[in-house]
């Protein structure tokens, strides 16, 4: 059998068939981390992925559908990677400590979250951020309750913890405060943990 007949009988799949919707969603998240929500557009993503725009339309009817898929992916992966990893920790104080340490040492998820907060006026972004924030607060409240706090104190402590997180993002990523040295940052994280965990 010659090369021509082999190619005719078993053609290579087109390049766009090799990319999944998840590949496009992850590329959109990477672009959000680099340049914000407004930067998500079909042509630059296609160039980045080395495919034609036809690959995009194979998976998504519009840019907004891609953005929705990207945000759902971010939401799902965050839920699984952060909160899912803590399910095996039985002691609530140890679980809170591990949560704070995991969150403190993430980088890209913070950047994506910070960029999404800048785009809260976008109709696709706002409901996702609302769900994520609500779920995070509920998790913190439940964890502080399990650590022995009454309902009101747990709510206050959860709000304080979440406000500290958002404030740190604001200082670090949006206001461009000088980056801490590693030992200074680790001391700060330990201070937060000992201050917030009862």
Image (cartoon, grey):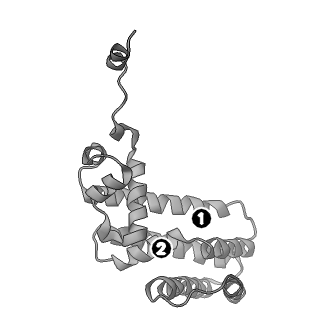
Q: Residue furthest top?
A: 1
Is residue 145 toward the left or the right of residue 126 in the image? right
Q: In front: 96, or 100?
A: 100
Is residue 44 toward the left or the right of residue 73 in the image? left
Q: Position of residue 197 (x, y in %)?
A: 70, 83
Q: In front: 87, or 40?
A: 40
Question: Could you classify mark 2 by the number of other residues whose Cα lies within 10 Å: few (under 14), some (14-19), or many (20 or more)?
Answer: many
Q: Which mark is residue 111?
A: 2
Q: Secondary structure at mark 1?
A: helix
N-terminal of the two: label 2 or label 1?
1
Is residue 109 toward the left or the right of residue 129 in the image? right
Counting labels gives 2
Q: Secondary structure at mark 2?
A: helix
Q: Which mark is residue 110?
A: none
Answer with the quarter of the image where residue 131 lies: bottom left
- Give the Cα separation between the discs numbered 2 and 1: 16 Å
Q: Marks 2 and 1: CB-CB under 8 Å? A: no
Could you tell me which quadrant the N terminus lies in? top left
At horizontal 44% and vertical 85% (from top left) the residue drawn is: 174
Q: Which mark is residue 82?
A: 1
At horizontal 36% and vertical 31% (from top left) the residue drawn is: 13
Could you tell me which quadrant the C terminus lies in? bottom right
Answer with the quarter of the image where residue 58 lies: top left
At horizontal 29% and vertical 77% (from top left) the residue drawn is: 121
In the image, is residue 110 above or below residue 167? above
In the image, is residue 107 above or below residue 182? above
């Amino acid at each position: 059998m010659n090369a021509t007949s082999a190619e005719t009988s078993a053609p290579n799949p087109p390049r766009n068939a090799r990319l999944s919707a998840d590949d496009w969603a992850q590329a959109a998240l990477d672009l959000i981390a680099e340049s914000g929500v407004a930067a998500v557009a079909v042509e630059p993503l296609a160039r980045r992925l080395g495919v034609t725009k036809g690959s995009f339309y194979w998976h998504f009817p519009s840019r907004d559908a891609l953005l929705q898929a990207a945000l759902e992916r971010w939401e799902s992966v965050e839920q699984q990677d952060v909160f899912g990893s803590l399910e095996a920790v039985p002691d609530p104080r140890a679980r809170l400590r591990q949560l704070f340490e995991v969150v403190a040492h993430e980088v890209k998820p913070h950047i994506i979250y910070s960029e999404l907060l800048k785009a809260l006026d976008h109709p696709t972004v706002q409901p996702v951020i609302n769900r994520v924030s609500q779920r995070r607060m509920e998790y913190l409240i439940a964890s502080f309750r399990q650590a022995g706090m009454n309902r009101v104190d747990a709510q206050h402590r959860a709000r304080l913890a979440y406000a500290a997180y958002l404030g740190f993002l604001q200082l670090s990523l949006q206001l461009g405060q000088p980056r801490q040295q590693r030992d200074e940052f680790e001391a700060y994280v330990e201070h937060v943990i000992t201050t917030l965990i009862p």
